[in-house]
Image (cartoon, rainbow, N blue to C red):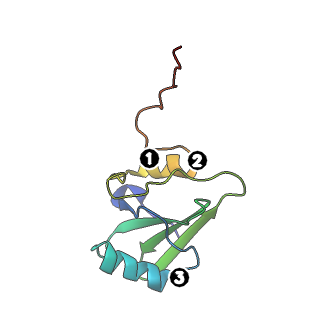
């Protein structure tokens, strides 16, 4: 299994997806809910409710399901379509490394003025 990651498109499904779902159900979500083709040259990324497990669905003459589960911490994940963005291969790497790519600007520290 060696993918030419530069030739793929990447799609994030905002909100949570039950991590127990198999490739059949994930492909139905892509086809019916996301209105995309699950057999396209694309990677579809899902995150569970606890935000500690990612699943990536890929078509390559059959479905691959890649899974990463964190032992500590959680992934930053968009909760709605408004927060979801088009992501790149580099963004995928950053998500897997634990970075929050969905917050493009750093959070401002609150200053309390008396």
In the drawing, does residue 68 fall left or right of residue 84?
Answer: right
Task: Tell me the residue that label 3 is attached to.
Answer: 22
Name the foreground residue: 40 vs 81.
81
Element type where label 2 sits in the image: loop
Residue 86 position within the rendered picture, expressed as x and y whole percent measured from the top left: 32, 53
Q: Residue furthest bottom?
A: 24
- Of the pair 33 and 36, the residue shown nearer to us: 33
Give how far apart the Cα atoms at labels 1 and 3 are.
26 Å
In the figure, 6 relative to 61: above or below?
above
Query: Which of the two discs, 1 and 3, labels the residue nearer the N terminus?
Result: 3
- Left or right placement of residue 54 versus residue 69 in this view: left
Which residue is farthest left?
35
Q: Does residue 38 appear anywhere in the picture? A: no
Looking at the image, residue 103 lies above or below residue 23: above
Q: Which mark is residue 97?
A: 2
Between marks 1 and 3 in the image, the one whose residue lies nearer the viewer: 3
Contact? badges 1 and 2 (CB < 8 Å):
no
Residue that mark 1 sits on:
90
Where residue 10 appears, as percent x and y from the top left, is 37, 60
Disc number lying in front (1 or 2): 2
Q: CA distance from mark 3 to mark 2?
A: 24 Å
């Amino acid at each position: 299994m060696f993918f030419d990651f530069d030739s793929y498109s990447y799609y994030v499904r905002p909100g949570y997806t039950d991590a127990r779902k198999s490739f059949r159900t994930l492909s139905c979500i892509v086809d019916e809910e996301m209105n995309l083709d699950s057999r396209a040259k694309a990677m579809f990324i899902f995150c569970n409710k606890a935000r500690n497990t990612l699943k990536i669905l890929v078509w390559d003459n059959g479905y691959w399901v890649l899974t990463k589960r964190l032992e500590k911490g959680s992934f930053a994940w968009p909760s709605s379509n408004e927060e979801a963005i088009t992501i790149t291969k580099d963004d995928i790497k950053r998500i897997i490394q634990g970075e929050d790519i969905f917050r493009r600007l750093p959070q401002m520290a609150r200053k309390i003025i008396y």
